[in-house]
Amino acid sequence: MNNKLKVAIVGTGTISNMHIQSYLNNPNVDLYAFCDLDEEKVKRMGEQYGVTRLYTDEETMLKELPEIDAVSICVWNSNHMPCTVMALNYGKHVLCEKPMATSAEEGRQMKAAADKAGKLLMIGFVRRYGNDTAIFKDFQDQDYFGEIYWAKAQYIRRNGNPGGWFGEKAKSGGGPLIDLGVHVIDLTRYMLGNPKPVSVYGATFQKLFDRRNLKTPKGYVSSSHTDHDICDVEDAATALIRYDNGAVVQVEVSFSLNVEKESGIIELFGTKGGAKIDPELKLFSEANGYMTNTTLEAKTAMNMGVIFQNEINHFVDCIQNGTQCKSPAEDGITLMEILDAIFESARTGHEVIIGQ
């Protein structure tokens, strides 16, 4: 008897490759079907990965293949909610790529559908599944840091607007804040113990756009990129987030910025010790009256293949064994409440109180 989890991929763009490879590496999964609006793309992906059940309409796939157990949603952001709700309504477990949606209200609709169906809705906060995060949490469990009261979260690209749907607000919901900021805001909140956000002050900037005039090549280009892309999202953003445990997080993100070099840094400061991920985990404290800096003899630099594999393995484990989900829908909604508040604060020029 085949007890493998039958998984379908909805959206076969660039990020879907990370899901697909990870599912193929999991012995408890049968990679069962692909769906994408682009018929040529889904055919190419089917040939590449040996998947023969190919569709251009999600509902048709779900109707014709009722044996599907779970779905990975890898479409552009504005389709996260409708595609997720549809899969849940057909009784499938769902792993939805980050961000959960384009607003907290959409996120609430997704969770309501999951609750009604009695199925798992997991959000792709992939940075939670890194070795750096696991080691940090291990030190945190031993009270190495004391009270963490301040953090900095930065994800800076100099010429990093990927083009395609990423720059089109109707599809993406925003620029670097919703694409890159999601990672660092969620990870710092997770490392702080998932406190409740109480207020936000933020600003967004639309000055450099996608810098298509530059001859310097981009580091990452969307598979949907064309020479006629719309670019109406912010190209940089900054914010100050306050949580109910007293902690404050400073956020800086950009697609386009006149800065010396690109960076992705997370720093956390506690009463007993601190930590920095840049990209490896480093610890700072004091011992015997001296300040100490600690570099670990462990692999802590982010490895995309490893963190996605860990995420997919966890998703499968949650479904098959009832393991508690590390990135549940509730956390996706909270993250969207923070992003909604940052955009609102940027629009009004005032601090936004969350939950009022």
Image (cartoon, rainbow, N blue to C red):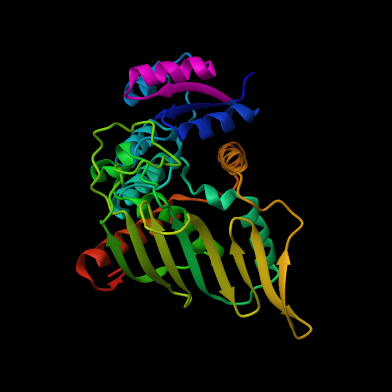
Instruction: Report whether 82 appears left or right of 326.
Output: left
Q: Is residue 48 magenta?
A: yes
Q: Is residue 291 above or below residue 9?
A: below
Residue at the farthest front position: 215
Q: Which of the image's four quarters has the C terminus?
A: bottom left
Residue 344 image point, x, y percent: 25, 63
Q: Is residue 324 above or below residue 4?
A: below
Instruction: Report whether 134 appears left or right of 352.
Output: right
In the depicted view, which residue is nearer to us: 337 or 205? 205
Residue 251 image point, x, y percent: 42, 65
Residue 36 image point, x, y percent: 36, 25
Looking at the rendering, the stretch of residues picked out in magenta corresponds to 30-51
Rendered residue at 67%/53% (across/down): 300
Instruction: Report whether 171 appears left or right of 6.
Output: left
Rendered residue at 47%/17% (across/down): 46
Q: Quadrant of residue 31?
A: top right
- Whether residue 100 is visible: yes
Q: Which of the image's four quarters has the N terminus?
A: top right
Residue 234 image point, x, y percent: 28, 54
In the depicted view, which residue is nearer to us: 177 or 74? 177
Residue at the farthest right position: 288
